[in-house]
Image (cartoon, helix red, strand yellow):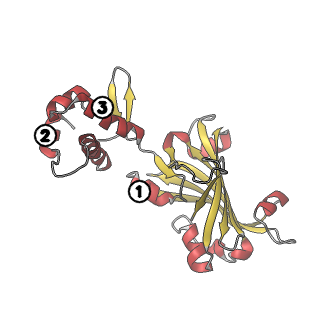
Amino acid sequence: MDTNYIMKTFKFSPDTNTPLYEQLASYIKIQIQAGVLKPGDRIVTENALSELLNISRTTVRQSMNRLVEEGFLVRYRGKGSFVADQKLKRNINYMYNFSESITDAGATPSSTVLINKVVDVDENTAQLLQLPRGQSKAFHLKRLRCADDEPIILESTYIPYYLCPGIEKYDFSTASLYNTLSNYYNLQLYHAIETIEAIIIEKEYAKLLEIKTKAPGYKIKRISYLDSGFVFELTTSVSRSDKTIFTLDLYKNSNPNKHLVELNRQINL
């Protein structure tokens, strides 16, 4: 994207209260999402943009800062700003939807099912799932979640089988697990607690994620509940740190007896 292209396709709107830097940032973001600008492409220099658009360099810098913060650009000292590889963005205030998140990043989501069967779980897993005494069966679903066929997340999920008999017949390479539980088993999915831990990815997982052994990543453990309070899901996932961004909106809590941020986040489905 050169200066001639910018002159032909962009102009500031005078009939809006949107600041100039936000208008410029939105324009560049659209060019990235539309594929005009591709990962690794160098952005026109801040001085050149300042002169071309007749705005201050401070305004241009604000635009670039916004795009860097949102993960669309990366800066290299002495070289300039470049389009970043798009990452999966997870807002950790809400239960994320993998397919929607990948689509929003401009990629095509897919899943490879590694395990899809009913198993007898160990005592610890049975306790976490709150299985009734004498029961040990759970549905085990293990999937490799991909963007444009590139592995991003390895998920391993256990669901009490008494809640979803016959669920193993569904094809979860295309079907949504949560939609299946809601639509076919009439389960009211309500609440989840998730913990996120920075890890070094072990050889077994690195091979599946197609990355180097001992690369940095995230281990995410989620326990989800029905509106009745019963556990319906235990999921452990390993996520590549080079492809994932977590965002968190913070608000001042009006209750002085509660902490502003907890290590375990609680979210509504």
Q: Residue furthest right?
A: 134
Q: Earlier in the sequence, mark 2 or mark 3?
A: 2
Q: Does any portion of residue 142 appear in the rendered image? A: yes
Residue at 51%, 66% in the rendered image:
174
**Residue 61 — which label?**
3
Q: Earlier in the sequence, mark 1 or mark 3?
A: 3
The quarter of the displayed image where residue 28 is located: top left
How far apart are the alpha carbons under marks 2 and 3?
19 Å
Q: Residue at x 54, y 40 (%)?
A: 241
Question: Pointer 3: residues within 10 angstroms few (<14), some, or many (20+)?
Answer: some
Q: Are marks 1 and 2 in contact (CB under 8 Å)?
A: no
Mark 1 is surrounded, within 10 Å at the Cα level, by few (under 14), some (14 to 19) or many (20 or more) other residues, namely: some
Q: Position of residue 165 (x, y in %)?
A: 70, 77
Q: Which x, y percent locates residue 253?
A: 57, 51
Q: Residue at x 17, y 45 (%)?
A: 12
Q: Is residue 69 left or right of residue 52?
A: right
Q: Regarding mark 2 in the picture, which secondary structure is present there?
A: helix
Residue 15 marker: none
* Label 1 vs label 2, nearer the camera: 2
Q: Exactly how many numbered labels are in the figure?
A: 3
What residue would you read off at disc 1? 103
Residue toward you, 65 or 121 = 65
Separation of marks 1 and 2 at Cα, in angstroms: 29 Å
- Return the x and y of residue 182 as percentages of the image width and height: 58, 75
Q: Which residue is mark 2?
A: 7
Image quarter in which the N terminus is found:
top left
Residue 204, by quadrant, is top right
Question: At label 2, which amino acid type do we have?
Answer: Met
Q: Quadrant of the C terminus?
A: bottom right
